[in-house]
Image (cartoon, helix red, strand yellow):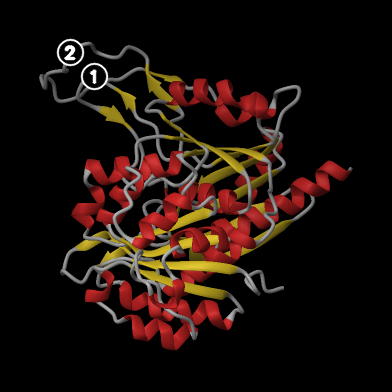
Amino acid sequence: MNNLQNKKILLGITGGIAAYKSAVLARLLIKQGVDLRVVMTPAAQEFIQPLTFQTLTGHQVYIDAFAKQDQTAMDHIELARWAELILIAPASANTIAKLNHGEADNLLLTICLASLSAIAIAPAMNEKMYHKDATQANLQQLLNRQFLIWGPAQGEQACGDEGYGRMLEASELQQHAELFFQPGVLQGKKVLITAGPTQESIDPVRYISNHSSGKMGYSLANAATQAGAKVTLISGPVSIPRPQTETFISVTSAQQMFDAVHEQIGSQDIFIATAAVADYRINNIAQHKIKKNDANMNLELVKNPDILQSVSALTNRPFCLGFAAETENLEQNGMNKLQLKNLDMIAVNQVGGELSAFNADSNAITLLTVTGKQQLARTSKTEIAKQLIELLADEYNENKTQ
C-alpha cells in the first residue's frame, strides 16, 4: 500500500549545500503520488534555482510572501491550510532558531507560523553548529512543541569536517514521510525504553562502566515513535543525539535507572530493556579521590538490582522485551535469561570481537520467545530497530488476544 498517494506535502527549502538533495526528494515524492508544493527561502535560491522545482513539480514555486502575480498575496494562509505535512529539508541552523522563536521574516516561516499541520525538519549544518548548545536547545524546544526532527546523519560534510549534521538522504526522508502517513503498529501504546550504559562511581573521579553506545536503544526509541507509540526513554550517559520521544529521562547509575523505571512503569504497555546496566556497584564510594599508593587496589562490589527482572515480576506488568549481550552460546544463554526473568521476548546480540554490537552502527539479533526464534541478519541498527518493533507489535497483539 502506498501511504503517500494523494497526500499534500509542502516542501520547504532553506539555504544550504544540501539543497541539491531536495530536488531528488521532490522527484521521489512525486513518483509516490504526492501532491507537492515547494516554498524556498531567499537563501535557498543562492544554492539552487526555483526553476528546478517548477520543472519537477509542474507547479509554481513560492518564494515571496508579498508577490502579486497569480494572486499569491495570501499564499501563506492558503498553503498553511492546504498542507497535511510541512517538510523543511534542508533545515538550516538559522531557520531552526527562527522556528523556535516564532519569527516570520520569509514566506516559509510565515506559513509555518500560520499552520496547524505537522512540521518535520531535516537539520543540515556543520557538525560544530549542530552540537552548539544554542542549536540543541532550539531543537529540544521544537521537539517539546511536537515538531518532527528527521536526522541529522553522521558522515563527511561539504566543509571537510566529519560528524553529525548531514541531511538525511532523499530516500530516507521519503521513508520518514511514508511512516508519518502510515497507521502505526504501536499507535497510542505507551512504551518505556532504557538505553546506554550506567556508570558506577569509585570516587569523585573514577567509575566502572561498559562499552555501550546507546545506539540500539535510541534507534528503537525512534522506531517505536514512528510506529505511533508514546515513548519514554530513560538513558544512561551517551554522546549521540537525543531522539524524538514524548519523555526523556537522563540517569547515571544503575540505581538511578532502577528508580526512574519504577516511577514510570505503572502506566506503560511495553517495556524494552536495551540498557547495558552494571551488574555490580562499589559498596563504599570514596568521598575523595583515591591516591595511587599501592601496587594493587581492592574494591568491594555489591550487586545492583535487576531492573528487567523486577519489572517482569510485577503483578500487572507490561509486555517485556529484554536484551542479552553475550560473547558465546548466544541462543542457549538467551533462552536461559528469557525463562529466568519471565520475559515475553529477548533479543540476543554478540559483544566482543569484530562482530561486537557495542559501539557499532550495525547489529545482528537472535530474537527468542518461549515458542520460537527468529534471526535478524546484520544490518544497520536503524533497520534492526524497525524489524524488532514490527515483530514486537505482532507478539504483543497476539498475547493480548489470548
| Residue at (30, 23) in percent of width and height | 201
**Is residue 163 visible from the viewing direction of this image?**
yes
Residue most extreme to the right: 402
- The answer to which of marks 2 and 1 sits earlier in the sequence is 1
Q: Are marks 2 and 1 in contact (CB under 8 Å)?
A: yes
Q: Secondary structure at mark 1?
A: loop
Disc 1 marks which amino acid? Asp
The amino acid marked with disc number 2 is: His
Task: Quarter of the image for the C terminus: give it.
Answer: top right
Residue 356 shows in the view: no
Whole-angstrom CA distance, mark 2 to mark 1, is: 6 Å
User: Residue 184's spot in the image, x, y percent?
Assistant: 67, 54
Vertical comparison of 355 with 325: above or below: below
Splitting the image into 4 quarters, where does residue 55 fall?
bottom left
Q: Quadrant of residue 178?
A: bottom right
- Residue drawn at point x = 16 percent, y = 69 percent: 160
Helix, strand or loop at disc 2? loop
Task: Estimate how packed mark 2 is, as few (under 14), some (14 to 19) or many (20 or more) residues with alpha carbons within 10 Å.
Answer: few
Residue linked to disc 1: 203
Number of marks in picture: 2
Which residue occupies 22% across, 75% down?
46
Q: Is residue 375 above or below residue 338?
A: below
Query: What residue did someone put label 2 on?
Result: 288
